[in-house]
Amino acid sequence: MLNRKLKLVLLPLDERPCNRLFPQHLFQHDGVELVVPETLGDKKQPADLEKVDQFLLNACRDADGLVLSLDTLLYGGLVPSRIHHKTPEELEPRMDIIRRLKQENPRLLIYGFQVVMRCPDYSSDDEEPDYYEQYGEQIHRAGEVLHRSRLGLCGDQELKVMLEEIDQDKLKDYVDRRSCNLQQNYRALELVEQGVLDALVIPQDDSAAYGYAAMDQQSVRDRIARKGLMRDVLMYPGADEVGLTLLARMLNHMAGRKPKVYVKYAAEGAKSVLPIYEGCSLDTTIRNQLLSAGCQITDSYENADIILAVTAPAERIEEAVQQPSQARGYCVERSLPELVDFVEERVREGRIVTIADNAYGNGGEMLLIRMLNRAHLLDKVAGYAGWNTSANTLGTAIAEGVDAYHFGITQSHQNFLVERYIEDAGYCGMVRARITRILSQYGMNYFDVREQDGVVSAKVRQELERFTREELSSIAPRVELHQVWMPWRRMFEIGLDASIRPQLLAWEA
């Protein structure tokens, strides 16, 4: 086990709480000093790259490890990676800082991650170039047809018609940027090959079967195979959870341990389900996520260090706003009561149990929360996550399990667990849709609530306080919601700061 305090440095994917604050709230405690930049960018405004360089040089001089977003290093953040106008030649010197960090601190362990640029199938410029509002769906479709054409699955005439519908200057801008970014993916592989990066994750932010992203992913995958880097470079669905995953891996590596993880499904059929927004089976993604976190899977819970409970249905995963689903995969072929009973018994045995609530996309499942609340398990499990994609949820729940494995249930760990209930189940599962319905009264919309701290964040906080009282009643008297804000001035995500007071012993009450 770890016998000293570690200094770890994180350069996040961007400034959103899931990338910047989640790792701090989970891992910043007596066992770990986690250093992150004080300032980054602001959505489409990239981080100041000179400040990024200075941060890395200063923070890594005496650090044990660095988890590094190459998208932030190169472009200033995830969204800036999709809209920049840099050339490969301009980006060439940006990777050199990684070599310098290694030279100045040879013992520094460096894990990198770099996203293959996505290609959404809808028209919106919220996180894409401005012209994506008009041409986004067509650009995605053109990539899909081009890919199918190359595979001999459709004729060239269909491709010709698609391309004629798109402004050629806009398409060239998009394709050129993809090509530039792909070259940086290749360069990252070279750094692994040369031992500058000790490991690399290339998360699949867009896992559609066909299209520009799929072609680039296959190109990178082929190059990984040719270079024999299959164990050093992992590709799997995900993105915003990777910082957590690689910090967990770093802890495991530095402790010289590979925790054994037993996966308990609420539905056996869930293993073969393809989660929404992802392109491979749930079981395959779980295995990749555990490998990426430096863990090993085991078929016996008796021999497990960590138990991962998975709530996914036996058939197609639906959106959280559609719950409760009446589909057979949820109601017939899945047994939440059996899963909760299993969790309860393992908790009684003193085992580390963490819950990946991926029953729905983009939010936690209220039925599960109510069952955990009634069984007084909310503060007894070591982890819970249920936000965004299944991969985001899995990576977060696994990281919670790893933190508990090494350091036990610290106060910061418990605070993070409570934040996940409030945000993942409360906000994502219920409150977001409720508040979105009244935005027009204030002249606002889902993508623009005008400010980070104002009328919307106040209403969200009010609703979340009500959610905590009503749905988390077994722990609500000990929970305090300190702050709520809208980081990107839209409804998709919130910033949240909450805490839970320790449970008083009988003689202290």
Image: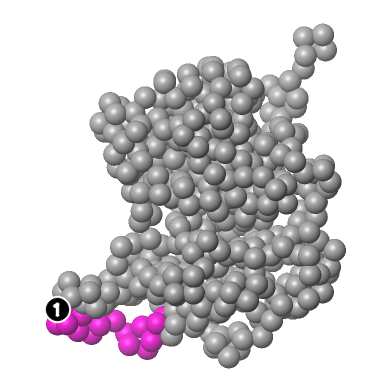
The extreme top residue here reads: 507
**SS of the residue at dot 1?**
loop
Q: Amino acid at mark 1?
A: Gly
The vertical placement of 490 against 115, above or below, is above
The vertical placement of 132 against 255, above or below, is below
Residue 55 appears in view: no
User: Which quarter of the picture shows residue 122?
Assistant: bottom left
Percent x, y of residue 267:
35, 31
Percent x, y of residue 208:
34, 62
The vertical placement of 77 against 280, above or below, is below
Is 165 magenta? The answer is yes
Residue 368 appears in view: yes
Q: Which residue is depicted at the point 20% across and 80% down? A: 159
Q: Which residue is mark 1?
A: 155
**Which residue is nearer to you in this view: 290 or 450?**
290
Percent x, y of residue 257:
67, 45
The extreme bottom residue here reads: 89
Quadrant into which the C terminus falls: top right
Quadrant into which the N terminus falls: top right
Q: Which residue is depicted at the point 37% across and 24% down? A: 335
**Which residue is nearer to you in this view: 505 or 349?**
349
How many residues crowd around disc 1 within 10 Å: few (fewer than 14), some, or many (20 or more)?
Answer: few
The stretch of residues the image draws in magenta is 155-175
Task: Please state if 39 lies on the left or on the right of 417 as rendered.
Answer: right
Q: Which residue is depicted at the point 62% across and 86% down? A: 92
User: How many numbered dots are placed on residues in this image?
Assistant: 1
User: Which quarter of the picture shows residue 258?
Assistant: top right
Percent x, y of residue 101:
76, 73
Q: Which residue is depicted at the point 28% across and 26% down? A: 332
